Image (tube, grey):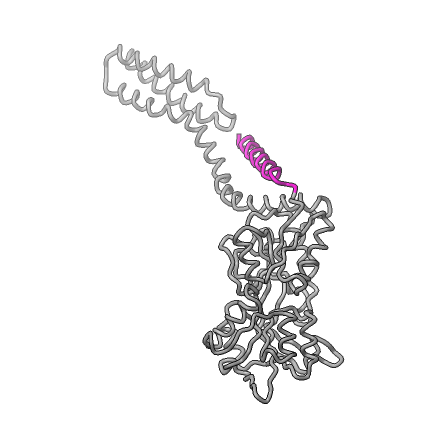
């Protein structure tokens, strides 16, 4: 009986698994991906993801935006399926992270002149023209957070809506005194700025205190020669603020797409760069968002061994089902342990439920000398004996029926002696 129950349970679980896997086993062919400014650092990384996903016939439809703030808005409005998002940018409560993928240094370039001094302590900045990124960009959001962390009021300086190459050009031409960037070191305009003898990569004072005042920021060591080796740019090592970029996704994103995006991130970012050791990314550290369970396991455990035998989209569904099944299994295990005891109780109860009446008959026989009543009690005992004898019990439990019938036989003999 226990084996039958276990078999039934296994069949139910298998049927549930097949139903779940068959609902949407084939992934969508197109995924909307908010990728930032066209031609920018995020865009170039997103094009690498797109090329990798094309191998599996998935079209990563890149959406050009003003930057991370607009990426977050599109995700919150459901107009994008996934996106790259700068650290510190808030997004809708339901949005999940597929992992942190790279570190972006928060770079501050200054162009001091005879008339303009740019202190290394940003709390002393006043009257500066700061190229702080376009409205809706991650750079503008980071700049505002940074200036707030430095204790500066909104009108202490002039924020120019310039970012990327435009901000670099404004600094070079003298139209800006400071330019702020949140960008990968590979951005071409950064090397150009460092090569400009009049522009300086600012090493801030009190950078640890500033980092602790900026949510989700970290400290990044940029070695000398990080941008170029001949001549070395920068000349000396710099310790800068940094933000960790993440891939974010809608909670209902198909698990096969999650699988491919995580593997694309692994291929692109796992080798590391001059500020990131090999193997640091992708990671679930410094993500500050609810984590996609499947992405978390992929990052922690690597690709499934089943990938060698099955298509990735089948493996993704199996892995997702396993993630969902584990909590159920842990809940069922205590129940499964009780099944043998419940079965034994149910068998014993088929016999023991008659003992209440046997005891009543025993008490009634002890209280009467009426032959007619005693004969009626003996007749009822004979009927109970036949009923127990007809029970179809497993061999292991037949002893309970034998014991009950023995008790009935003893009681019948006592009643017979009383009648005689």
Residue 400 is drawn in which quadrant? top left
Q: Position of residue 305 (x, y in %)?
A: 69, 49
Out of 353 and 237, give the one closest to the viewer: 237
**Identity of the residue drawn at 69% across and 55% down:** 50
Which residue does the image show at 66% across and 52% down from the upper left? 61
Is the residue 310 above or below the residue 393 in the image? below
Q: Is residue 236 left or right of residue 88?
A: right
Q: Is residue 24 magenta?
A: yes
Name the residue furthest right. 230
Looking at the image, which is closer to me, 365 or 144?
Answer: 144
Question: Which region shows up in magenta?
Answer: 1-26
Whether residue 192 sits left or right of residue 369 in the image: it is right
Rendered position, 238 above or below 348: below
Quadrant in which the C terminus is drawn: top left
Location of residue 191 (image quadrant):
bottom right
Residue drawn at the location 39% of the way across and 27% of the way down: 352
Q: Main secondary structure of the magenta part?
A: helix
Asked whether 187 or 244 is in front, the reply is 187
> Residue 197's image quarter?
bottom right
**Which residue is at a point 67% across and 45% down the rendered structure image?**
29
Direction bottom: furthest residue: 114
Q: Is residue 406 in the magenta section?
A: no
Is any part of residue 172 visible from this angle?
yes
Number of dots carrying numbers? 0
Residue 418's x, y, as percent?
A: 28, 15
Residue 239: in sight, yes or no? Answer: no
Q: Compared with residue 382, is residue 20 higher up or lower down, i.e. above or below?
A: below
Front in this rendered view, residue 417 or 23: 23
**What x and y, as percent, mark residue 277?**
67, 69
Question: How far across and down, in percent of the image, does residue 41 sit?
Answer: 66, 65
């Amino acid at each position: 009986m226990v084996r039958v129950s276990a078999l039934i349970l296994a069949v139910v679980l298998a049927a549930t698994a097949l139903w779940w896997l068959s609902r949407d086993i084939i992934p969508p062919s197109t995924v909307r991906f908010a990728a930032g400014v066209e031609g920018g650092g995020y865009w170039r990384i997103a094009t690498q993801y797109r090329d990798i996903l094309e191998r599996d016939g998935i079209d990563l439809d890149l959406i050009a935006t003003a930057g991370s703030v607009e990426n977050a808005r599109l995700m919150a409005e459901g107009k994008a399926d996934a996106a790259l998002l700068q650290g510190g940018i808030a997004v809708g409560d339901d949005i999940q992270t597929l992992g942190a993928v790279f570190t972006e240094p928060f770079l501050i370039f200054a162009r001091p002149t005879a008339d303009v001094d740019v202190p290394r302590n940003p709390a002393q900045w006043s009257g500066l023209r700061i190229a702080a990124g376009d409205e809706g960009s991650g750079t503008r959001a980071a700049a505002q957070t940074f200036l707030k962390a430095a204790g500066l009021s909104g009108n202490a300086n002039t924020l120019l809506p310039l970012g990327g190459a435009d901000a670099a050009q404004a600094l070079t031409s003298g139209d800006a005194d400071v330019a702020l960037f949140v960008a990968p070191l590979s951005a071409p305009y950064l090397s150009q700025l460092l090569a400009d003898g009049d522009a300086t990569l600012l090493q801030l004072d009190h950078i640890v205190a500033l980092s602790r005042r900026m949510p989700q920021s970290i400290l990044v060591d940029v070695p000398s020669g990080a941008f170029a080796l001949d001549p070395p740019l920068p000349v000396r090592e710099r310790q800068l603020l940094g933000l960790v970029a993440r891939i974010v996704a809608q909670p209902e994103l198909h698990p096969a797409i999650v699988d491919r995006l995580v593997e694309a991130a692994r291929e692109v970012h796992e080798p590391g760069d001059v500020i990131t050791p090999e193997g640091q990314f992708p990671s679930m550290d410094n993500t500050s968002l609810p984590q996609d369970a499947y992405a978390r396991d992929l990052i922690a455990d690597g690709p499934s061994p089943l990938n060698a035998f099955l298509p990735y989209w089948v493996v993704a569904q199996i892995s997702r089902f396993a993630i969902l099944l584990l909590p159920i299994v842990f809940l069922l295990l205590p129940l499964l342990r009780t099944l043998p005891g419940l079965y034994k109780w149910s068998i014993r109860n088929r016999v023991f439920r008659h003992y209440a009446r046997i005891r009543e008959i025993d008490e009634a026989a002890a209280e009467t000398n009426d032959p007619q009543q005693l004969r009626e009690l003996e007749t009822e005992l004979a009927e109970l004996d036949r009923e127990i004898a007809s029970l179809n019990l497993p061999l292991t439990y037949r002893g309970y029926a034998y014991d009950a019938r023995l008790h009935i036989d003893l009681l019948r003999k006592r009643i017979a002696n009383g009648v005689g």
